[in-house]
Amino acid sequence: MSFTITVRELKERLDKGDKILLLDVREPHEHSLAKIEGSVLIPLGELPHALNRLDPQAEIVAYCHRGMRSADAVGFLLQQGFTNVKNLIGGIDAWSVEIDPTVPRY
């Protein structure tokens, strides 16, 4: 089972109406610069204290700036018993380049 998803795969899934929780694990100042609409912000450092805000049964796609912090988040969530979690390859930077150029790059 793969724990990654590309921005194109995510866009196709969202366009189909699949129910996916987008988890932004960046810092609030980054989230205010650029975000994927509908995402939930829980910075990586706060994730251990915010598990009660996430549904363990939900499909979760975590993202950050380029995919490093969200990879850590996915590993952590898997350790906590979440089973349907994926890391967005390339993060919001790839989303801006390949999917939505209106999302600012930083």
Image (spheres, rainbow, N blue to C red):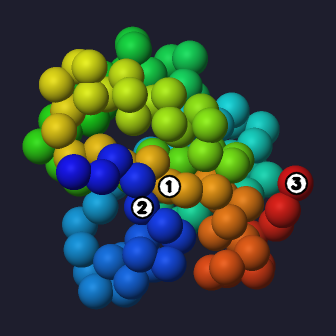
Q: Which amino acid does label 2 sit on?
A: Ile
Residue under circle 1? 88
> Looking at this view, is 22 or 65 the one in front?
65
| 51 to the left or right of 9 | left
In the picture, the disc for residue 106 is 3
Q: What residue type is labelled 1?
A: Leu
With respect to residue 46, does 10 lie above or below?
below
The Cα atoms of the two marked residues, 3 and 2, are separated by 22 Å
With respect to residue 13, does 42 lie above or below?
above
Residue under circle 2? 5
Instruction: Decide which of tag 3 and tag 2 comes sooner along the chain.
Output: 2
Q: Where is residue 16 in the image (x, y as percent from the top left)?
A: 28, 86
SS at badge 1: strand
> Looking at this view, is 16 or 81 the one in front?
81
Instruction: Decide which of tag 2 and tag 1 comes sooner along the chain.
Output: 2
Q: Position of residue 1 (x, y in %)?
A: 22, 51
The answer to whether the residues at label 2 and label 1 have Cβ atoms under 8 Å apart is yes
- Name the residue rendered at 30%, 52% in the picture: 2
Q: What residue type is labelled 3?
A: Tyr
Q: Where is residue 28 in the image (x, y as percent from the top left)?
A: 69, 35
- Name the residue rendered at 54%, 48% in the picture: 63
- Name the residue rendered at 79%, 53% in the picture: 33
Residue 26 location, quadrant: top right
Q: Can residue 60 be seen in this view?
A: no
The residue most toward the right is: 106
Q: Which of marks 1 and 3 is in front?
A: 1
Instruction: Decide which of tag 1 and tag 3 comes sooner along the chain.
Output: 1
Q: Is residue 86 visible?
A: yes
Mark 1 is surrounded, within 10 Å at the Cα level, by few (under 14), some (14 to 19) or many (20 or more) other residues, namely: many
